Amino acid sequence: MFSRKNNFILLLIFLIFFVLGIFRSQDAFKNDYKTFAFPGDGHGTIADFYGFNKSLYQDGLWQLLVDRWYPNFGGGYSAPKLMNIFWRFVVFSLSNYEPDNIYDICVVLLFVLNGVSAYLLARYLKINPYYSFMCALFIVSLNNFDFRITGHLNLAAYFGFIIAVIFLFEATKNPNSLKKTIILGIVVAFSFTTNEYYGLFVLEISVIYYFIIVWRKTYLIFTLKNGIYCASSFFVTLAFIYPFTFLGPLISKFDISFSYPSRIIHRSEYLQYVLYNPLELFTSNFELFTLINEWIAKTNYFSRNGGEFSYRIGFNIILFFALFVILYSMLFGRIKLKNLFRKFLPLLFLYFLTIIICIHPEHPIFGNISFVNLHIEYGTGFRVNERAMNLGNIFLILIFGTVINEFSRSIFNTYSNRIVKFILPPLMILPFLASIADARFVNFRPWDRWTVQPMPESIKFVKKLQDLPKGMTMEIPYYPENVLVETTYIHGLHAAYHGNEIVNFMSGKSYRNVGLSWWSRQVNNPNIKTLETIKKAGIKYIIVWNNPEKLPHASNVNFNPIFYRNAFGLKKLFSEEIGDIYEVIGVKNFNQKVFGEFINNTPPQGKYSHQLMHVFNSDLRTLEVNNNLKFILTENDINRPILSGPNEVFDKGNYQFSFRFEKTLFTNNVDPCLKLEIFSKENGMLSETYFTDDDLQKIGKQIDHEIFLNTLSTLEFRIVPLCLGEVVFREVYFKKKDIAALSGEK
């Protein structure tokens, strides 16, 4: 496979994909501030690449050897992020380029690596160089690649699992070779470093395929013994590649402080991203197959399709596959047809495995053998199971290539006419091009340029900070947790261009940073005391956006930019229509400890007005002076929360929670007419108290509850009327008790 001739052809294939990648990417490199990265995940990836490189230069190159890095977001209190070894070294090697250019170069790199690895797999399967190239071109032309390079860049990295499949075939071809078995485990572990989804899927199909094939060739005990060797090399390699992720949960069992990601995903979320109908993969772009498309739609057992579906490959590939198999049978007989089936049977089996990995567990035919339930139970975080069909499509293309290759080879061996040998290869391009067109769209060409997006105009504005002394920077509005996570990525993108660290979070979580919501409300609607807090924390620059709704994925947040324009103690550095940049006078250095006291703790006291809570039938309520909310209770309000919220996280400790009313008056003086609840998402009902109208008149306008929280708790306060009457709500107030003692604990 690696003779001098083959090596020369391989170099030629590399150059072809490199030139093709450069041609397809030229719109990004010719134009400043244009990139393949779309708003949202694309911008977040650019921010992460920049943040990782900055972390390397500030904290040391040792981070190249671990799978965690600590972003300089959130004033240094952002959660650690995962970046595997392949991306760490690639991003670091490109660190001298502009942030968006790093992203765009990675796109070209992945395109080339995918093409070359696909070519190598096809050559390993004994497909000749010409058809191997056509298979590789088909694979890199799939819609999924063009779709993924706009945001989830690592999902466009196919080469890791393609290489793993080569070693899987090699290990099962030579089951007595312990060396190849051990290498298989290492390579499958490496496939996780390009993308964890693809690593998991190739691991699952490798285990099943290896066990079946080696058992057939040897015996059970030998298969199990070699399987143990392979598994050992896999786990050792995985522990080396992912020391924190792989060993973190184990270390945590021994009460050793450690940071690793954890996430609970509901079953319904898993089932949004599974393969509902395998036939849907073959829906055609051509009007000729409209009736077939309609029939495929009718075969769907479910009422809808899976989300994030970019794996349709069209009907032409099946049509040409069937056509050439029939022609092969007619021209060369059943014996050769059986040999042909033997050649693509392993790929067909792997294709079937990718379907059962991601098929809906309630599918009437394949549901009982679906891997989705297994992933729900043990694969927390791997929620988009249908991504396995990216592997499946590659196997299908290689099956198609195998049939075309064997058909052509048999034609050449049977008919020695030079005209046949001259005409057949270019003629065989047509099935590939027609299948590519069906998988994409009729006018698609493999050299079509990738779509680019202009970078936000705000990038040019924040770059003005590059020429000023470094300092901690904050953007206003400061987004709380309850916004679309993609909304916050713009902060990281801006940081990649102004070069400063930021106190804004990318996807901040109040369960980790308990004071996040309080800090955001304070700086979005500031007063003189707020500015003093900002100075204490050592925040040097404040960027205030005049029209934040024009930023990518903007969320509607209540904020007041006017205070900053008129505040004493701020110096306006730059002002444009898009926003203003201020310097906080007198600030020299960021005080992470002081900022941490605000961002990581529930404040000593606070209050929630009705604006921060959910109001049932809000249009029927009356807003009074002093921001009080008046409820004239109707039958529709009885026995349901007329006011609930805010569902915010509180520190553990002793609290006094006070429901404050301006007025409570009920028509029934005997029976309980008002129920007040304090509910914890983690611990259930903490307090449930009932009051008659007489009780309320005696207690007065404030009703106190003493609550001890022994863990972080997400609290919801509920006001539930049980009788007709009138309630005027003022606020829910809280204060920490024994504040000094609590501070000592921390």
Image: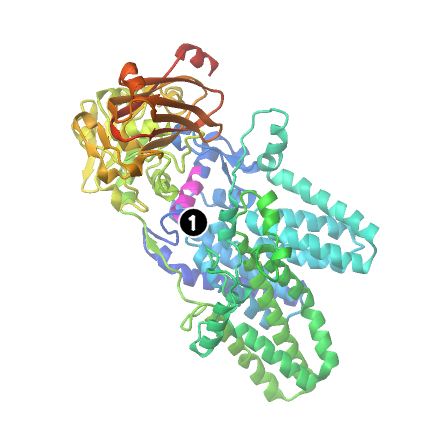
Q: Is residue 611 magenta?
A: no
Q: Residue 499, image x and y in percent? A: 35, 36
Q: Position of residue 135 (x, y in %)?
A: 56, 68
Residue 33 lies, with reference to residue 731, above or below; the image says below
**Quadrant the N terminus occupies:** bottom right
Q: Residue at x 65, y 64 (%)?
A: 347
Residue 689 falls in image quadrant: top left
Front one among 627 and 728 = 728
Number of dots carrying numbers:
1
Q: Main secondary structure of the magenta part?
A: helix
Quadrant location of residue 175?
bottom right
Is 49 a magenta residue? yes
Q: Nearer the viewer, residue 301 or 640?
A: 640
Let me know if residue 579 appears in the view: yes
The residue stretch that appears in magenta: 42-51
Q: Relative to residue 689, is residue 156 drawn left or right?
A: right
Tell me residue 292's x, y (percent).
49, 75
Q: Is residue 589 visible?
A: no
Query: On the image, numbered disc 1 is attached to which residue?
Result: 103
Query: With respect to residue 231, does 30 lie above or below?
Result: below
Q: Nearer the viewer, residue 143 or 262?
A: 262
Q: Position of residue 46 (x, y in %)?
A: 41, 45
Q: Quadrant of residue 561?
A: top left
Whether 738 is drawn above or below 72: the answer is above
Q: What's under tag 1, amino acid-wise? A: Tyr
Categorize mark 1 by other alpha carbons within 10 Å: few (<14), some (14-19), many (20+). many
- Foreground of the two, 105 or 3: 105
- Residue at figure coordinates x 60%, y 77% from the top left: 322
Element at label 1: helix
Up-down relation of residue 472 to residue 557 (above or below):
above
